[in-house]
Amino acid sequence: MLVMVMDTATAAVTAALAQVGDDEVTLLAERVTVDARGAGELLAPQIAAILAECGASAGDLTAVVAGVGPGPFTGLRAGLVTAAAMGHALAIPVFGVCTLDAIGLRLPGHALVATDARRKEVYWAVYRDGARQAGPDVAKPAAVALDGIERAAGDGAEKYSDVFALPLEEPRYPSALALAELAADRVRAKAPSETLTPLYLRRPDAVLPGERKPALQ
């Protein structure tokens, strides 16, 4: 089963082609470009490039897997719209995975995953041996409870390493292989397509202007 994997919830614009077998998941090709503002322009060419590299076509795909965040509104939306459109056009199921889970999947022990949420905040979740225990949520780094946390991963953890004061682990950005593995059981079961619900966790920066008040009252 060939699966297109994509994530635009962090600065790493990721597209990959994975093969989901009965017992394992294999990454066949991957493109990652770190550009926090480039998701809308980079993702489609990356998808085309990995299909060409593998000698595959969109019609060969069995499913689409997309990271649903948390992430900033504009970048995250670009990936989810692309994933939903591809699934609809090809009549194949689309599955969502929490982006933080893909970072935390192989972290040992009690770990924090934090990605950059801008506005001097982080998106965060806590994991124990790869299983999420708390979050996802968004907060100032100093407000994240660190009781018992042994290590941290993610670009937010690196950016605010002075605040968290924890040993840093890889990966810094979500792994396409981990995203595929987290959705693999649904792919194998030929589960129905999911509605991709973005984890924005806060209102977008751009808001509609309020009603204008008359100049003369």
Image: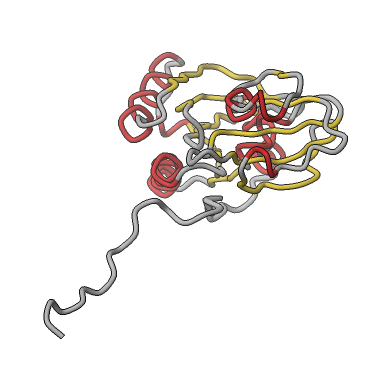
Residue 45 x %, y %: 33, 25
Residue at 67%, 29% (x, y): give it.
Answer: 163
Instruction: Measuring from the top left, give residue 33's x and y in whole percent.
Output: 43, 20
Q: Is residue 142 left or right of residue 206?
A: right
Q: Quadrant of residue 103?
A: top right
- Image quarter for residue 79? top left
Colour setting = secondary structure
x%, y% of residue 48? Answer: 36, 24
Q: Is residue 10 left or right of residue 123?
A: left
Above or below: residue 153 compared with residue 99: above
Q: Residue at x 46, y 19 (%)?
A: 31
Considering the image in quadrants, where does the N terminus appear? top right
Q: Specify the quadrant of the image occupied by residue 162.
A: top right
Give whichever of 175, 177 is nearer the camera: 175
The answer to whether any part of residue 212 appears in the image is yes
Q: Is residue 201 above or below residue 76?
A: below
Q: Is residue 168 above or below residue 146?
A: above
> Going by the picture, which residue comes out furthest to the front?
217
Residue visible at 47% across and 20% down? 32
